[in-house]
Image (cartoon, rainbow, N blue to C red):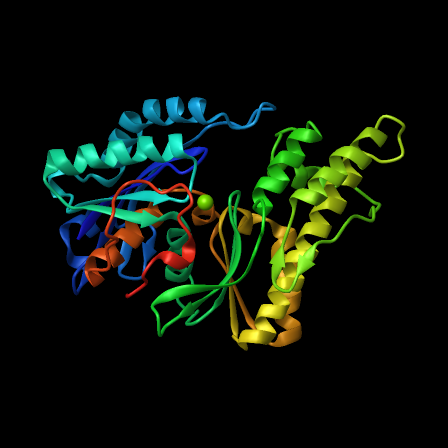
Amino acid sequence: MIVLGIESTAHTFSVAIVQKSKGLSKTSKATKRAKTKRQLSSIEVLANASDKYASTLEGYIPRKLADHHAEAFPKLLQQALSDSSISLSEIDAIAFSQGSGIGHCLHVGYVAAKTLSTMLKIPLVPVSHSIGHIEIGREFNCETNDPLVVYVSGGNTQILGLDKKNSKYHVYGETSDIGIGNFLDVLGRKLELKPSDAVGVVNAAQLASKYIEMPYTIRGMNLAFSGLLTYIEKKLIPQIETKKFTKEEIAFSSQETAFAMLCEAVERALCHTNKKEILLCGGNARNARLQEMLKEICREHNVHFACTSFEYSGDQAAMIGLTGIKMLESKCLPKYEAPVQRLRTDLTHVCW
Ligand code: MG
């Protein structure tokens, strides 16, 4: 089975071609062509072409993101087909990110996917973006069986576990306002760092030598980041001019505080669920400091730590194609195909 995946929830537009081979995968025609590509158990990513809208000080304007995505689609489609040596006639289904995400961006991906599926007369598979992040993490870390999932990205921060009885993910804890990635991205812009996003914060944090005390908001296993952001903006940033604090100290302390809150919630969820594995996934799984803090918790609790690879942590369409294959094989498809801006992780049936 060959599925073309489309990702378009936020700043990144991506087109991937993913294949699941029957039986001896190494003998199949398409697998031979793609033998240099990385193998994901019996599922292989033959192409994963992406283009990210560059972060600016004005933030992400939905209309501009949609224009970027509409322009990127034909170019990335061509690239994915050429990278995989697959022709459109060989594709069995089109999978796309149904949500959650920014409405304008989701709509571009949906129209692109719907057009291809109508034109080629093949099924259209609406995929939950967050389930895609989890599934690609699980597929890569085949040693994890039933992990506590720590999903950290721009729009999401959730601590989840699979509820096998109901075939759905159960949310043990989550942010009650903005995602941890969004918090770091906005902070990068407020501090006018280069790049003006979470990456700028990570780079600046490495140059700091002093920790500044900050508000710490956690209730049970739930978190909140917007109050912390307001405190930083109103109380700390104005003091950069008087040289009381540096940008680097603020970046370092903000990151430490936000991650400490998340780690406390994760530790509580670990004790509550008694799970023996942690899987870190989502765009902010790339953060080495967060990985280090979670590894320490895992050592203390004798729990296995797994993390999605750098390549597949951020937004990309391989995770959408891969999840699309699992949904088609298990006949686990949603009733509606239209994009859903606030599609929750715990609404998707996971029957595979
Ligand atoms: Mg994401």
Q: Is residue 352 above or below residue 118?
A: below
Pick whichever, 307 or 347, lies toward us: 347
Tell me which residue sits at (16%, 38%) in the image.
117
Pick whichever, 267 or 338, lies toward us: 338
Residue 203 in picture, x, y percent from top left: 67, 38
Q: In screen coordinates, is 206 left or right of 346?
A: right
Q: Is residue 14 visible?
A: yes
Quarter in which the C terminus is drawn: bottom left
Pick whichever, 23 or 302, lies toward us: 302
Residue 227 in picture, x, y percent from top left: 70, 44
Q: In screen coordinates, is 147 left or right of 287?
A: left
Residue 146 in picture, x, y percent from top left: 43, 71
Q: Is residue 189 above or below residue 217?
A: above
Q: Is residue 264 above or below residue 289?
A: below
Name which quarter of the figure residue 188 lies in.
top right
Q: Is residue 33 above or below residue 82?
A: below
Pick whichever, 222 or 56, lies toward us: 222
- Rendered-image quarter of ligand 1: top left
Residue 49 in picture, x, y percent from top left: 34, 36
